[in-house]
Image: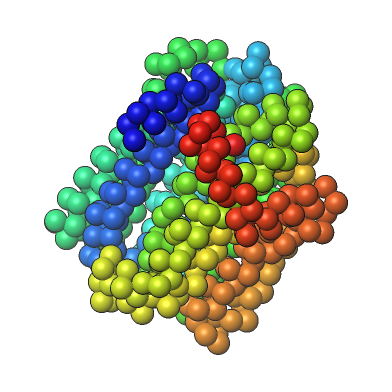
Amino acid sequence: MIKQLHQLGTKLSFSQRRVLGNIAWLFTDRFLQMGLALFVGLWVARYLGPDRFGSLNYAMSFVSLFGIIASLGLDSIVVRDVVRYPDAKHEILGTAFLLKLIGGLVSIPAVIWVNSLLRPDEPMMQWLVAIVAVGGIFNAFNIISFWFQAQVNSKYSVIVRNTAYIMTCGIRIALISFEAPLIAFAVALLIEMILGGLGLLISYQWKERDFHRWSQSMQRARSLLRDSFPMIITGAVTVIYMRTDSVMLGQMANDRLVGLYAAVMKLAEMWYFVPGAITGTVFPLVIKLKEQNETLYYERAQQLFTLMAGLSYLVAIPISLFSSQLMFIFYGEDYVEGGNVLAIYVWAGLFVSLGVARGPWMVAGDLLNFRATAAAAGAVINVALNWVLIPRIGIMGATIATLISQCISCYLANAFHPKARELFIRQTKGIFLFGLPQLMHRFWRKGKLI
């Protein structure tokens, strides 16, 4: 086995080793955080109980609905532009940073005001939302992560994120030990955002030493906002159908159900970093491939869709079979009733991974407007189904709404657009694991997955 792995390593080109190395760093990032989440995050959930845990997650979900104001949909656009126009790096990063900083500042009063209208008689909830919302300012520093991603060199952002996460995990353990109130855990989340943002700035300055050269341009700002507008719409509606379930459960039912739903989501979505890490790493390569070889461009899409579907099945099948046991093991008896919900919710991961995997091809193929339309359709369907199903079947209604809306937005919608239909066909083949044996043979013999 060791000899085969050594032979595999010698067959990889420099660019292939760089891609796999970047994926390895991203996997290390998520595995470390996943391990800490199992220990600390579940401890927090047990300590707070479904009611208080639900209140904290309601605040986080509510703030995330306004997060698109802070991000402005610039993530993929920044990666694309610094790959295409490396000489304009300082202007792109500086302008995007300023735009995201302004967006973060604007979002704070907006989220506080809307929450005060929806839950006027709950001062604790208003404090929780306000504290979490302040963290949106520091999301502006995430622009540095996109730079490292564009360079296929994510180890610096990984080190920063994990350092911040480990430190705040220590804070959370101390809070549990001293039986701290709920609001202290919201403050710990804010501290994590602050440490992560400042850490990214320090790591960038240590690596590049040119933060002082960042500049802003009105022309560049207009260009970024124009190109990112479809992503703003996509991001907004994606957040709606990913997080509106929790908000609507809190408004139409109670925070206890929000706590159960949040616990289910954390288990079901724990592996979502995998499609994101793989797709984010190959993103710059796809942009280049579009201009060089159209046939190979779609072949790589097929390989990625097949890989994502296979990974989804490896996760969803065992979790569905042992959902109640997993809820008891991880969260305790208070959360066991979420087992049936987990058995269904976990299958949304199949469509989420296919949707994430199509992202680079959507950007490279100028399908961002369609992607926004598909996401909007998914959001509308999600809200409508929640509105109908939550009063009738409670938390299970929110779960069914999520599964259906993800299927439509990430998969079925592609069949209705001429330029996206090829992706739909390849997604469908991926669901049936088309070419999986050849894909695994290709990786083992040549060291290439895509």
Q: Position of residue 294 (x, y in %)?
A: 78, 33
Q: How many marks?
A: 0
Q: In which quarter of the image is residue 241?
A: bottom right
Image quadrant holding the N terminus, namely top left
Q: In this view, does 146 lie to the left or right of 174?
A: right
Position of residue 184 relative to residue 231, above or below, is below
Position of residue 429 relative to residue 82, above or below, is below
Q: Where is residue 436 in the image (x, y as percent from the top left)?
A: 57, 50
Q: Where is residue 127 in the image (x, y as percent from the top left)?
A: 39, 58
Q: In this view, does 298 lie to the left or right of 404?
A: right
Q: Is residue 342 left or right of residue 296?
A: left
In this figure, which colouring scheme has been used for the structure?
rainbow
Q: Is residue 152 left or right of residue 407?
A: left
Instruction: Look at the image and tell me whether residue 211 can be seen.
Output: yes
Q: In which quarter of the image is residue 256?
A: bottom left
Image quadrant holding the C terminus, namely top right
Q: Where is residue 48 in the image (x, y as percent from the top left)?
A: 26, 66
For the point 41% across and 40% down, the residue is 27
- The residue nearer to you, when weighing 246 against 126, is 246
- The residue nearer to you, when weighing 171 against 328, is 328
Farthest left residue? 178
Farthest bottom residue? 392
For the point 55% across and 87% down, the residue is 392
For the point 61% across and 18% down, the residue is 89
Instruction: Look at the image and tell me whether residue 240 can be seen.
Output: no
Position of residue 137 relative to residue 317, above or below, is above
For the point 55% across and 37% down, the residue is 442
